[in-house]
Image (cartoon, rainbow, N blue to C red):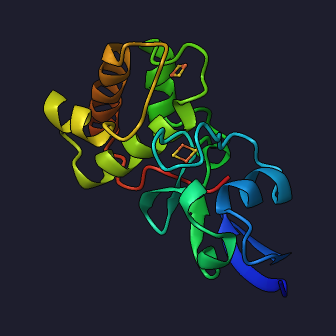
Amino acid sequence: MTKKTINLTVNGRMRAAFVAPRMLLSDFIRHELELPGTHVGCEHGVCGSCNVIVDGKAVRSCLMFAVQADGSEITTVEGYSTEGGLHPIQQAFWEEHGLQCGFCTPGMLAAAKELLEANPDPSDEDIREAISGNLCRCTGYEFIINAIRSAAKAMRDADIKNTLQPV
Ligand code: FES
Ligand code: FES
């Protein structure tokens, strides 16, 4: 199949690429852009470990083709931290022990980011709902909920409106 040129912004940087129409966005991010923080746990849209932020929404990158992201703005887990250190959501996962093996974590962070931008003061029920599409086989979820609750408070205290800064 004929390859197509795409242009997109990834973690604040303009990127251009020449990709086959069938290439998944997840494979494109991992193998072409060499950003392996985005994980692939099922390739069926079930586990959520491939979630990245596309134009402000957490989306399954395994269910999108790279060509569909042409013109989009994408943030992967590699784009969360700043020169000042970890993003408050990352810091909270660290402090509250919201990860063990870490495989689900980039997708969890994307789900948390989307939630906290829309709802800075979520209830535990809101948090459970927001991560209900993200599977974790290690933590039992409670520490993840604690982490997101703690991140929400830290961000409210710091009055962080835009939760992601390009590196
Ligand atoms: S790898 Fe995309 S949802 Fe599991
Ligand atoms: S920390 Fe291992 S799958 Fe979530």
Residue at the image point whose x is 62% and y is 33% from the top: 85
Quadrant in the rendering for residue 27: bottom right
- Residue 164, relative to residue 101: is it above or below? below
Whether 99 is drawn above or below 164: the answer is: above
Name the image quarter holding residue 71.
bottom right
Residue lying at 76% horizontally and 50% vertically, measured from the top left: 30
Query: Residue 123: in sight, yes or no?
Result: no
Q: What x and y, as percent, mark residue 81?
A: 61, 40
Q: Which residue occupies the foreground of this view, 14 or 155?
A: 14
Q: Is residue 139 visible?
A: yes
Residue 145 placement, left or right of 79:
left
Would you say 162 lies left or right of 40 here?
left
Which percent across, then down, holds residue 103?
A: 61, 27
In terms of depth relative to the viewer, which is nearer, 93 or 159?
93
Q: Name the spot of residue 10 as percent of width and height, x first.
A: 67, 63
Quadrant placement of the N terminus: bottom right
- Whole-percent x and y of residue 106? 56, 37
Q: Residue at x 41, y 36 (%)?
A: 134
Left or right, residue 31 beside residue 163: right
Towards the viewer: 95 or 38: 38
